[in-house]
Amino acid sequence: MVGVLTLMKLRVLAHSTSGARAGGLFLGAAAGLALAAGTIMLAGADLPGPALRGDLFTAALAVWMFGWLLGPVYTGGGDESIRPEQLALIPLPPRRVAFGFLAVSFIGVGPLISLVAFSALVVYAAGLGLAAFIVALVLVPLQLVLVVALSRLMLAVMGLAVRSRPSAVLSALINAGVNATLNQSWVLIWAAVQFGLVDRGLPAGFATLLRVLPSGWAVVCLDALARGDWPLAAATGAGLVALPVAATLIWSRLLVRRTTTRPAHRGPGRGRTPLLDRLDRAGPVGVVAAKELRTWSRDLMRLHLRWFAIWFGLVYTLWPLAIGWAGLLPWAGVIVVVMAAATSANLYGLDGTALWLTLVDPGRIRADVRGRQVAWLIQVAPVAVALTVAGTALGGGAWTWPWALALLAALLGGGAGLIAYASVVFLVPGPEPARRGGNPLDAGNIFGQVLAMLVVVPATALPAAGVALLGNRTGSPLLSWAAVAVGLATGAACTWWLGREAYRRLGERGPELLARMSGGGTVTPGPGRATAARVKLPPRRAAVVTFLVVVCWIPLFPQGLVPLYLIWRGSDTRLWFLALHLDDPFRVPVAVAMALLGVGMLWLGTVLSRRWQGAAA
């Protein structure tokens, strides 16, 4: 059983790890190894007092555990290269299937990197005695089994949780809340520095909580061995063995429910409403928009993604209130728009092969794209406007209004254009909606697409931001408010132009896109221009291009443009900005050099990709 599943998994990896996917895998592995190295260094760090080292190391292990719990959910439903549904007709006991799939889960880059990170337990135990050192060698694989088993259980629970609309909204709140909290971890770091926690240690209650979590049981076991507390060491060690077994047994029962039940839809999500009636009478574009609105309310995947964007924007901007700073509240609507666009950039991929209904009537293609844009704006704009107005009134000043409104207008238009364009040009094949019942969170491998949208969508607001900045610089309120008009103009232009490009390309490449979705992303290249457009980069070159395009934003924005802005404002903030830790006259040249480095990396990545495509043609 395990051998067959292992061969299947290896064969899938061999055929799917190429091109941009290989580049993304290489980049993710490099980042993971860097985090693993940091964990090992923390485990052996010479900190004031062993308690502080244990507290921080336990916190790092908790971060790894939550990464395993939430990472698969956040990146499109986890690894579904082999599905339990494929074995549904084979007479196998559920427990055997569950343990087989658990064994296969250890095949991949992620488990290997986690194993390296958890080897920090050996480093931590090096100074606790021979018994702790020997036990740590056993705890390292147990820690890996623990997080993988809990990850599979978490994914199964989330898959069942989004089988009704109320639970889909609630699960989106939990998912977005934890992700926003991890993204706003700087608040916790700032609080730790302000209150001297780095020197005095973590609060006793929080330190205890970290050790109560399953991720901290290994540290508790090692500390107990160092003190000679053998009963506690035996109890925590037994817990590290029993919990993965229990999680796998529970998962086996959930696998039965997954393969034998379907999501519960309690009636239509949207009935006959005045808005839908007006759209139905508004021509082909209105009909498509009404159809999309009904789909957004009935498709649990889309419902989950929409509410994830809303909850993420809210929690992300509310977190700084914990340290008494309300400066992010005006940007709640902006963040919701960016996240909604990032999670909506694969509309045709989510629909599956239903695209053929549009392609058989070429006259419907333009209306289909425009209708989807209208529906997305109807879904996102009211919430974003309400959050922007409320957040600016509560946490902004007079200067914030033109900024917030200008950026919101530009991003709404840019997002409406980019979701249509990306859905056609960068389509990610996913499972058919009717076959997504086993795992409603399975949206395909959309992580790279989401990451790219999180970078490109904010770029559509740069003209409006430039005018608003110029208004602040010159002290002209009229010029500052002119940024709102610029935002409206650029937003409308992005919606119109990118939408036009989307339906033109859909008309030209529609059959190819349909074949990609039918074949899971594998299409035999046709003759002519389309062949060159679909040539894949070699794995090494794809890794280099992916590294350049992804990493270039670090020197460009955080180490380049942001320090230049802070220097211009005369801010004393230093944080992790390299240029701000230098003395004049080196601050500005270093910040400019970092910005130019980022631009150069982006240019080089683009040139390498285009030259290979041209050579292949």
Image (tube, rainbow, N blue to C red):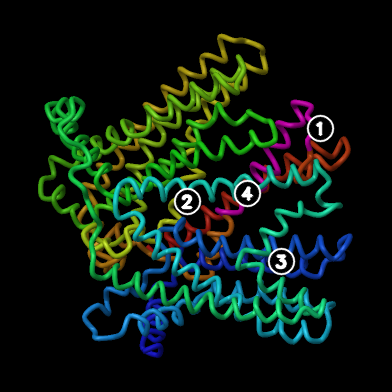
Q: Can you tell which of label 2 and label 4 is closer to the viewer?
A: 2
10 Å neighbourhood of mark 1: few (<14), some, or many (≥20)?
Answer: few
- Amino acid residing under circle 3: Thr
Mark 4: secondary structure: helix
User: Who's the residue at 49% across and 42% down the image?
Assistant: 312
Kindly report the distance in space between the C-alpha atoms of the residues bearing marks 4 and 1.
Answer: 29 Å
Q: Which residues are magenta?
A: 549-573
Q: Position of residue 139 (x, y in %)?
A: 66, 80
Mark 3 sits on what residue?
A: 39
Marking on residue 600: 4
Q: Nearer the viewer, residue 56 or 473?
A: 56
Mark 2 sits on what residue?
A: 175
Q: Position of residue 304 (x, y in %)?
A: 36, 48
Q: Can you tell which of label 4 and label 1 is closer to the viewer?
A: 1
- Amino acid residing under circle 2: Asn
Mark 2: secondary structure: helix
Q: Nearer the viewer, residue 476 or 184?
A: 184
Residue 582, quarter of the rendered image:
top right
Quadrant housing the N terminus? bottom left
Height in image: 145 above or below 2?
Answer: above
- Amino acid residing under circle 4: Gly
